[in-house]
Image: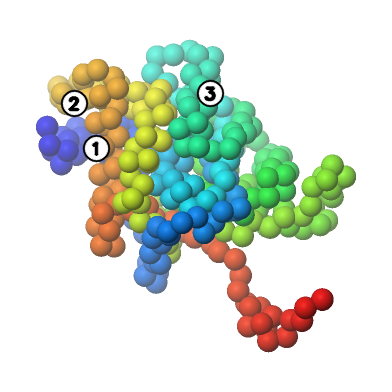
Amino acid sequence: MERREFFKVAAAAGLGTAAQTPGMAETTVAGPAPFIERANPGQPHKGKVFALITPHLDDGPIFAGGTIAKLLNEGYTGYFIRVSNDEKDSYNLTMGETVLVNEQDAARFVEVAGLRKRYDLEYRNHGLDDVSRMEIRVRLIFLFRLLKVDTVLSYDPWGHYEENPDHYVTAQAVEAACWTAADHLDFPEQFDVGLKAHSVREKYYFARGPQLVNRVVDIGPTIKQKATYIASCRNMITNMVKSTNESLAARGLRIAAFSGPQEAANEEYIQAAFLERDKRIGAKYGLEYAEEFHYIGPSHELDDYIRAHAQRI
């Protein structure tokens, strides 16, 4: 079946893009034309550090995998901070088995992507709205200071219509931690173990629903890396495929490409559900593939004054 036909069948079946697929509204809030970020030659960001901070393993690969690969290719050192234990994402596994298999897949993603290390905060999946945001914030501030994080990738704390509490709680904690990590009066006891106040300078925020998009990253050169990152989340993609098949069967429908050997079915699903979406996003900006973000960069308010008045000491 042609991939475009898959979406027609899925829509007719009342599935959206597919059952269990993270929502992907592809809707932007009105604003100025976004900046197009393209691949940079060499490694201009060598020495810089980014942290991917998401509640679930597959969030980063699905929504920012191409950008993650781009930053790594350009010299960044990357870390993955997984906030939940992903205990609710599997197909017919027990909760304990689900935690284990997703932990193993998280290790595979870190290895495949070439990230430096993974930190699991291990909060209960789908229960982050019952956790103190301050507690999560303090843990993130410690890691930002420890790792000297320059850039974060996470969910947009201002994304509209987000239904998953894990997503908006994580996003709010990340945003708050980014600026309080730079304050010398916030948790100064951390300085007694050698840490220093540290400012996170750049933020790439993605969303499942409408958001203010002001930066679009050209991921044409890294789309294959992105597909590999998503495929490393083997258990979660398998859950999406099997759940989709189950929903289709209940409506008397079947997609042959999703019904064969699991690895091949997963690959086809990744192409149909995620890479085709990135192609449609890219087409809006004259690119082959793209990812959209609400980007917040460093302040340049004093740059002119500093250039005019700063002296060597």
Q: In which quarter of the image is the C terminus?
A: bottom right
Indicate the secondary structure of the residue bearing disc 3. Answer: helix
Horizontally, residue 99 falls left or right of residue 211, namely right
Q: Are marks 2 and 3 in contact (CB under 8 Å)?
A: no
Instruction: Specify the label residue 257 is tagged with.
Output: 2
User: Which one is earlier in the sequence, the residue at label 2 or at label 3?
Assistant: 3
Q: Which amino acid does label 1 sit on?
A: Ala
User: In this rendering, is residue 62 above or below 244?
Assistant: below
Return the residue nearer the eye: 241 or 313: 313
Dot 3 corresponds to which residue? 103
Q: Which residue is found at the position 57% from the left and 31% from the top?
A: 84
Quadrant position of residue 129: top right
- Whichever of callouts 1 and 2 sits on the residue coming sooner in the sequence is 2
Count residues near mark 1 (Cα–Cα under 10 Å), then give few for <14, some for 14-19, many for 20+.
Answer: some
Residue type marked 2: Ala
Instruction: Say few, some or many: other residues with alpha carbon within 10 Å of mark 2 (under 14 / 14 to 19 / 20 or more).
Output: some
Tell me the element at label 1. Answer: helix
Q: Name the residue under label 1.
A: 272
Q: Is residue 273 visible?
A: yes
Q: How far apart are marks 1 and 2 (CA)?
A: 10 Å
Residue type at mark 3 is: Glu
Closer to the chain start, of discs 1 and 3, is 3
